[in-house]
Image: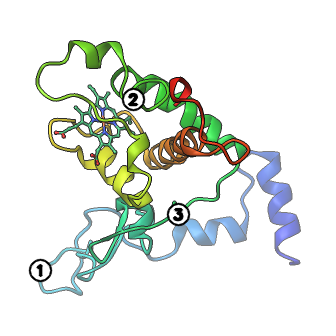
Amino acid sequence: MRWLIPAAGLALAGCNIPSEFLQRMESQAKYEYYETSEFWADGRAMRTPPEGTVPRERPVGNPGLTTGRVNGTLVSSIPLELNHEVLALGQKKYNIVCSQCHGRLGDGNSVVAENMALRLPPSLLQLSDKPDGHFFVAVTEGYGVMPSFAGELNIQERWAVVAYVRALQQARNSQAGGQPLPQENR
Ligand code: HEC
């Protein structure tokens, strides 16, 4: 601690005041990028990281979150904390990226669907028995003739869209007051 206070003072002063503390770091023995080294047989100071080394930035340990699958099995529930913000994000992204084909309500009624000849975008409301991972994987990898949307939506946005699709399913498939919703509202 005794070191830190004068050092911080010098750093704040922002000029080249010689300081034994700072100079020692500057002049310590160390290799620079691409420098040669006599220590290693190949003469290179930069070493290849051991096999299996993973960059710190890469998300690890949560394949369910990043791929929608754990050991090949679709994850059953969204691996994110769900709150109002996530749902609002999902709604926004769904309306931008998915609704023109699957419809604002997820029921497959859309202008694009009306004019599509090849294969119609299915209603997403009938897929409530599918695990959450199914939707994430469909959006991430593409599904049949539907392309991947991984370029449009990052991982968090994709899960947020899944959460919103679930909300659409619940809203449309739920029973009001114990009665099924009238047909025209479904
Ligand atoms: C360009 C139109 C289009 C867009 C945009 C689109 N989809 Fe699709 N989607 C389709 C079509 C068509 C299929 C059926 C593909 C097939 O069966 O070959 C499909 C299939 C799916 C399926 C699989 C359905 C099943 O039977 O299991 C899911 C889930 C899905 N889409 C979700 C989404 C979500 C979420 C988005 C937005 C991120 C989205 N789609 C955007 C056209 C689209």
Give coordinates of residue 143: x percent, y percent.
21, 44
Image quadrant of ligand 1 equals top left
Q: Nearer the viewer, mark 3 or mark 2?
A: 2
- Mark 3, secondary structure of its residue: loop
Tell me which amino acid carries mark 2: Cys
Question: Seen in the image, is 96 located left or right of residue 6?
Answer: left
Q: Is mark 3 within 8 Å of ligand 1?
A: no
Q: Residues within 10 Å of mark 3 (few under 14, many from 20)?
A: some
How many numbered dots are placed on residues in this image? 3
Q: Nearer the viewer, mark 1 or mark 2?
A: 2
**Are the residues at dot 1 and dot 3 in contact (C-beta closer than 8 Å)?**
no
Question: Seen in the image, is 102 located left or right of residue 19?
Answer: left
> Where is mark 1, residue-wise?
42
- Mark 2, secondary structure of its residue: helix
> Where is mark 2, residue-wise?
98
- Looking at the picture, tell me which residue is in the foreground, 3 or 168: 168
Q: Nearer the viewer, mark 1 or mark 3?
A: 3
Label 3 vs label 2: CA separation?
A: 21 Å
Label 1 vs label 3: CA separation?
A: 46 Å
Give coordinates of residue 114: x percent, y percent.
26, 14
> Where is mark 3, residue-wise?
79
Residue pictured at 73% horizontal, 64% vertical = 19
Residue pictured at 22% horizontal, 71% vertical = 36
Instruction: State the quadrant of the N terminus.
Output: bottom right
- Mark 1, secondary structure of its residue: loop
Say whether disc 1 or disc 2 marks the residue closer to the N-terminus.
Answer: 1
Tell me which amino acid carries mark 3: Pro
Q: Residues within 10 Å of mark 1 (few under 14, many from 20)?
A: few
Give coordinates of residue 166: x percent, y percent.
52, 47
